[in-house]
Image (cartoon, helix red, strand yellow):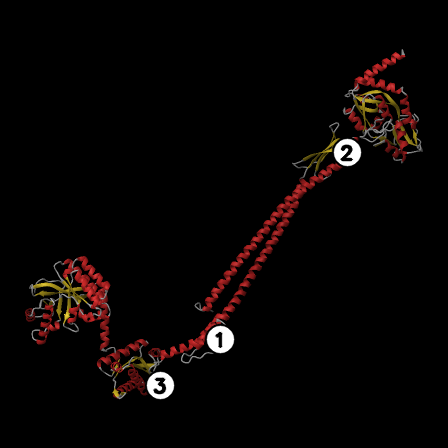
Amino acid sequence: MKRCIFILTCIVTLYGWCDLPKRIHLVEDPWPPYTYGEPSFEPTKGAVVEVLQHIFHTVELKLTLHPWKRALLLAKEGKVDGLMLTIETKERQEDFIFSAPLFYDEIVFITRADTILPYKGLHSLQGLKIGTVNGSKYSDEFQEAILNQQIHIEPADEIQTNIKKLMSKRIDVMIASKIAFCSAHKELYKDKNYTIISPSLKKIDLKIAITKQSPFAKHMDTINQEIRRFKNDASYQQIRQRYFDVCSL
Amino acid sequence: MFNRHSIKFKLFTIVTMVIVSFIAIFFLFWVRNTHHIKMQIATSNALIVKRSTQENETVQKKASESHLEEYFKLVAQVIALDAYNLDYDAIQSKISNFLNHEGLCTLEITDTVSQKNIATAMRNCMTPTILHKEIPIFFRHELIATLNVGYSLEHIDAKIKRENDYLRAQSMLLQESVDESFLNYFYLQAVVFFLMTLGMLTIVWYQIDRTVVKPIGVLLHHMEIMDVNEPTFSSEKTLAFSQTEIGQLSEYFHKHIAKLIAQLHLRANYDALTQLYSKQKLLDDLKNSNHHTLAILDLENFKEANNFFGVDVGDAILRYTATYLVHSFSEPCFRLYRLHGDEFAIVATQHNTFEEFVDKLQCFASEFSNEEFNNDGTLLSFGISIGIAPIQETPSKSMTCALVALKHAKNSKEPLVHYSDELPIIKAYEKNIYTLNLIKHAIKENTVIPYFQPIFSHKEGAITKHEALMRIQYKGTIIPPLDFLEVSKKSNTYHHLSAHMAMKVIAHLKTHPHDSIAINITANDMIRKDFCAWLLNVIEQNGIGHRMTFEITEQEGIENFDVVKEFIAEAKRIGVEIAIDDFGSGYSNFEHLIHLDVNYLKIDGSLIQNIVTDKNAQLIVKTIVHFAQSLHIKTVAEYVSSEEIFQYIQAIGIDYSQGYYIGKPHPKTQRELP
């Protein structure tokens, strides 16, 4: 029976892939460890890159890195087929169809190791300089706090800048995805001179976002099936280990 | 300063005109060229300014546009990353700062992906013309956005205008400076040319003055100070000019001309034969009021002695007379002159009274008449006639008065005659002048009229023709030819009277077809070819030749018989008959009858008027008549004044009679005896 189900699944999957367009173009910003590389170029490596290569192995896969806003704009405008990896929000659901989660992460506040920050909600960060990345929306609550000027943010172009600013005490605390922070910090510093504040602000599922204009939008089921299949594959775990071990997730 | 007729003045004028004209023309050319250069500079300046302004405008605009384009590219580069990152705030901030650049009006960033303006900066340029440019914004060769720029070049135009205005102002300043320089240069030129003219005039005039005018002046001065009686010259002043033509002329003048002039003066003032003063010297001296009396002396019978013994003896007589005069009038108060021929003159000065002078002259005349000139053993003596006259207003009048007195002395055989207005010869002169005026009046007013004296033909027993005799009608009186004939011939006006007379006779014949008229033709008339041609032509044209007779008078005056014979032949060809007038008187002789083919002989009245009683006259007249009859020539007796004469001449066979017995001259012709 299992064999029959497997065969049937394979047949359906094959049928689904056979119907897919031949080429998909996805964009993302440089977001280690998910993506590595320079903007406007193809990513050199990254966890999501390898995952996507497996998932879209039957079509021609084109990946390009852009600043996040540009990547998002390109995707929204339908200039590309979608985003490699992003958080599903209500706002984005208007433009995108999201896949099944590829990875899990957390939005956390990080301080220097020598700083003690008793975190009891966003209000406890009042009066502190919070480093953010331009264009990033960490959570609705956080965005609302910014709008209400409950918190004071100091945006930077990239996460590395915020880490440097944090370590040089130019900001008091920074917000970032946990995996991205760890990966970026590892690139800059050998020692663990930071403290990740618990609890996290938000737990996030990172998904592929396909634009509604893209021909791949109607094949999201096929893509999700492939994701689920791949997540069950040993390669997926190997990829996670290779890229996410730094944060011991 | 100058005599305007002098060489100095004329040379100065010519040289000045030439130099001034030359300098003026040169100056005009110079000024024209200078003006041309100035205009070229102005034109070049204007051209340079025009080109510079145009080039400046082009370059400035180009540079400005290039600069703006570079600036736009810089803006694009600067905001490329932000545009790529879609960092609108950063872009807005930056382009707002970029907008401060001069000339920029608007900056808009249009995202390529969304085609939306992601940033806009604007400034009010307040200019009508705004240029637009699109600058693509690339990020790593990817077109990510477009920079739309609105800009204005008004500030560049204003800048160019300011620069060009400055350039034009500088050019105008330069041109003004050039104009001022040229004006100063013009004044300088004028001064230089003026000084040049003065300099050239000075140099040329100095040279002309030194080489021409001064030598001529010196020469003239020498001529002025020269004593004509003894011309001597100083050659010192002319040495400086000896190399020039004037110097040579001066030298030549000194060597030759002056001597000739001196000789000329000598000959003019001295008589070469007698060494007395000349007539010219007398005329010059008579201008001197220091003299009171002039006496002119004439040797009697000198001409005969001169002709008889020859010129050498005549000269010796004159030298002898002169020597005698010098001895007789040796006092300084007398001056002796030889006029010409045998005429001498003595002038007495105020130092001598008139009476003393007259006494001395009479004494001289008496002594000289008694002296004898020894001509190789032949003793000759000469009387002296002297005419004296007081010095008159003019030398010529003094001479005339003295000569009149001398002539009267010679005519009256008196040794010495004082001039007086009452002298008979003066009356004769006055009468001659009156008669000449009368003749001129008659010629001018055509008052010559013919009087006709009848000629009686013995054969026909009737008056067959008339002789036209000349009369002048003057103020109601008829002047006979005796009163004017001699004067008219001596004053050479007779041919005019003859012409008038001939015209009147011809006119008479034209109106009186039955009359035959004889007119007098003199030898003087016949040699005048124009008169003869006119007379014969008029006679022929009127067909009156057969009724006319030419009476040839004064045959002794005929010198060219060929001319007379030719005239007679021509006259006879047209029917005119020829008569010899006054035959038997003077030099009239039978030779004329042989040479001249005549029709009539008019026997002179002097033979006819006494023919009744004078046997000689009868013999001569009979001989003439016989001779004429032999040659078939008819004879006419003149002066037939009585019936006895008329009967006698008819008896001896004379063909015609003319005289008061036949009829007196009358204005009209008559056909019958009175």
Which one is in front in this view, the residue at disc 1 or the one at disc 2? 1
Nearest the camera: B236 or B574?
B574
- Whichever of labels 1 and 2 marks the residue nearer the N terminus, that label is 2
Q: Residues within 10 Å of mark 3 (few under 14, many from 20)?
A: few
Would residue A182 be found to the left or right of residue B562 on screen?
A: right
Residue at which label 2 appears: B80
Nearest the camera: B207 or B534?
B534
Label 2 marks a residue whose chain is: B
Label 3 marks a residue whose chain is: B
Would residue B636 be found to the left or right of residue A132 on screen?
A: left
The residue that appears at 65% across and 47% down in the rendered structure is B166
Q: What is the distance, in whole Å, between disc 1 and disc 3 at their CAs? A: 40 Å
Residue at which label 1 appears: B238
Q: What is the distance, in whole Å, between disc 1 and disc 2 at their CAs? A: 112 Å
- Relative to B436, residue B337 above or below: below
Which one is in front in this view, the residue at disc 1 or the one at disc 3? 1
| Amino acid type, label 3 | Pro
Give x and y (percent) for residue B354: 30, 84
| Amino acid type, label 2 | Ala
Residue contact at pointers 1 and 3, CB within 8 angstroms? no
**Which dot marks residue A199?**
none
Label 1 marks a residue whose chain is: B
- Whichever of labels 1 and 3 marks the residue nearer the N terminus, that label is 1
Residue contact at pointers 1 and 2, CB within 8 angstroms? no
Residue at which label 3 appears: B332
